Amino acid sequence: MSSAGKSVVLVHGGFVDGAGWKGVYDILKNDGYGVAVVQNPTLSLTGDNAATRQILDEQTEPVVLVGHSYGGAVISEAGTHEKVNALVYVTAFVPDAGESVNTLISGFPADGPQPPILPPRNGFLFLDKERFHQSFAGDVPLRPS
């Protein structure tokens, strides 16, 4: 039984997978929480919502649903599931009704780092390797000293 009578479901962002939650998973499990990690296919928000709801269906206790980055858009959709008691956004997109991640990205300040997302190719998004570091890890040296 979890320490707060809750289970935690972790939802990853785009361009990554559920393995990114391993450190958080380990800490929560060590503290006695029931933890599940959603492995989103990241082909569509509809598909990711369905994958998250499938994991939520399997939970036997109230759920704290956690999303990182694009995962925030996913938990905004899946968070209406009857087993969800709370939503936690970790550096995540929090779209309002009718908004999308693209809508939110278009509002980023022009003088700040821009997401290095390239235009879709054959329905898939890719990242610009040249812009990735500045956008995602600008405070981290390119090469560790």
Image (cartoon, helix red, strand yellow):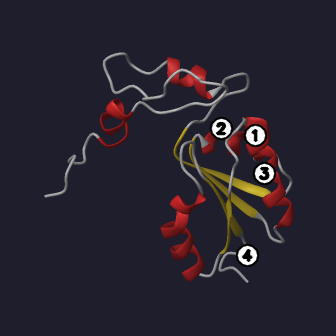
- Residue 10 vertical placement versus 138 (above, below): below
Query: Of the residues shown, which amino acid type is indicated by label 2?
Result: Ala
Query: Of the residues shown, which amino acid type is indicated by label 3?
Result: Ala
Distance Cα–Cα, label 3 vs label 1: 11 Å
Local crowd at mark 3 within 10 Å, few (<14), some, or many (≥20)? Answer: some
Front-most of 42 and 23? 42
> Closer to the camera: disc 4 or disc 1?
1
Q: Point out which mark residue 5 bears.
A: 4
Query: Of the residues shown, which amino acid type is indicated by label 1?
Result: Glu
Quarter of the image with the N terminus in it? bottom right
Distance Cα–Cα, label 4 vs label 1: 24 Å
Local crowd at mark 1 within 10 Å, few (<14), some, or many (≥20)? Answer: some
> Closer to the camera: disc 3 or disc 2?
3
Quarter of the image with the C terminus in it? bottom left
- Residue 92 vertical placement versus 1 (above, below): above
Residue at image position (65%, 38%) is 73
- Disc 2 vs disc 4: Cβ atoms closer than 8 Å? no
Local crowd at mark 2 within 10 Å, few (<14), some, or many (≥20)? Answer: many
Distance Cα–Cα, label 3 vs label 4: 23 Å
Instruction: Find disc 2 in the rendering and name its residue.
Output: 73
> Closer to the camera: disc 2 or disc 4?
2
The earlier-in-sequence mark between 4 and 1 is 4
Instruction: Find disc 1 in the rendering and name its residue.
Output: 77
Instruction: Find disc 3 in the rendering and name its residue.
Output: 51
